[in-house]
């Protein structure tokens, strides 16, 4: 008798359990970024680097505007990310700041001794974010490139560049005189 009653209960429980579908959360998509502005300040000097790709990947080449930096100088920097495909333009920087635990700005100078980048802003887990900090130039005349990558790392951010995907990946020419 117990077997006859127990089997239907188990089957019914299995049916209810299998019907309990948990919806997968929507994937946290990469941001659309059409414009990146890097502003460096030191004393009265302001240097502005601008990258614009208003038509997105695969269209026209991006417009890149650089500047010349002074040797042996430390600059404070601020990065701004915009989506100018919308009217009015959307300041994506605010969303990056809001979701700081999912983002990391990675700086890679080439050559590696071109300059030193120090990130000063952090997320709630005390991991680097990278929207602000300092950039120190070397004590010699040099030319090179500063690669800036905005890494999108939802659920995987550990302070390194490895996990995640690129929201942006650009190169600014750097001239130090």
Image (cartoon, helix red, strand yellow):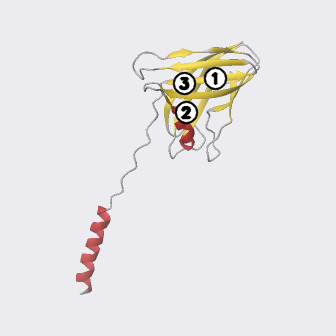
Real-space CA distance between mark 3 and mark 1, rounded to the nearest whole angstrom: 10 Å
For disc 1, the neighbor class at 10 Å (few under 14, some 14 to 19, many from 20) is some
Q: Residue at x 39, y 20 (%)?
A: 58
Q: Are marks 2 and 3 in contact (CB under 8 Å)?
A: no
Secondary structure state at the residue bearing disc 2: helix
Identify which residue, 86 or 3, lies in the foreground. Answer: 86
SS of the residue at dot 1? strand
Q: Residue at x 74, y 18 (%)?
A: 44
Could you tell which of marks 1 and 2 lies nearer the N-terminus?
1
Q: Is residue 142 above or below residue 31?
A: above
Q: Position of residue 27 (x, y in %)?
A: 41, 43
Q: Quadrant of the C terminus?
A: top right
* Residue 93: mark in rendering: 2
Badge 3: residue crowd in 10 Å (few <14, some 14–19, many ≥20): many
Q: Label 1, on which residue? A: 39
Q: Secondary structure at mark 3?
A: strand
The part of the image, by quadrant, that contains residue 140 is: top right
| Alpha-carbon span between mark 1 and mark 2 | 14 Å
Task: Tell me the quadrant of the picture where the N terminus can be found.
Answer: bottom left
Quarter of the image where one finds residue 106: top right
Mark 2 to mark 3 CA distance (whole Å)? 10 Å
Q: Earlier in the sequence, mark 2 or mark 3?
A: 3
Identity of the residue furthest to the front in this view: 88
In this view, 41 is above or below 161 = above
Total marks shown come to: 3
Q: Is residue 168 left or right of residue 138?
A: left
**Rendering coords of residue 21 (x, y %):** 33, 58
Label ID, residue 36: 3
* Residue 157 shown left or right of residue 70 in the figure: left
């Amino acid at each position: 008798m117990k077997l006859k009653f127990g089997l239907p209960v188990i089957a019914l429980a299995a049916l209810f359990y299998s019907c309990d579908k948990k919806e997968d959360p929507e994937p946290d998509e990469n941001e659309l970024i059409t414009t990146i502005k890097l502003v460096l300040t030191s004393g009265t000097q302001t240097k502005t680097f601008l990258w614009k790709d208003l038509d997105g990947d695969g269209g026209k080449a991006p417009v890149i505007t650089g500047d010349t930096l002074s040797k042996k100088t430390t600059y404070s920097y601020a990065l701004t990310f915009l989506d100018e495909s919308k009217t009015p333009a959307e300041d994506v920087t605010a969303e990056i700041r809001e979701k700081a635990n999912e983002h990391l700005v990675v700086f890679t100078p080439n050559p590696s001794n071109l300059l030193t980048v120090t990130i000063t802003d952090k997320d709630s887990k005390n991991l680097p974010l990278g929207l602000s900090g300092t950039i120190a130039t070397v004590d010699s005349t040099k030319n090179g490139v500063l690669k800036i990558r905005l890494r999108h790392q939802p659920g995987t951010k550990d302070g390194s560049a490895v996990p995640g995907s690129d929201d942006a990946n650009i190169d600014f020419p750097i001239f130090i005189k």
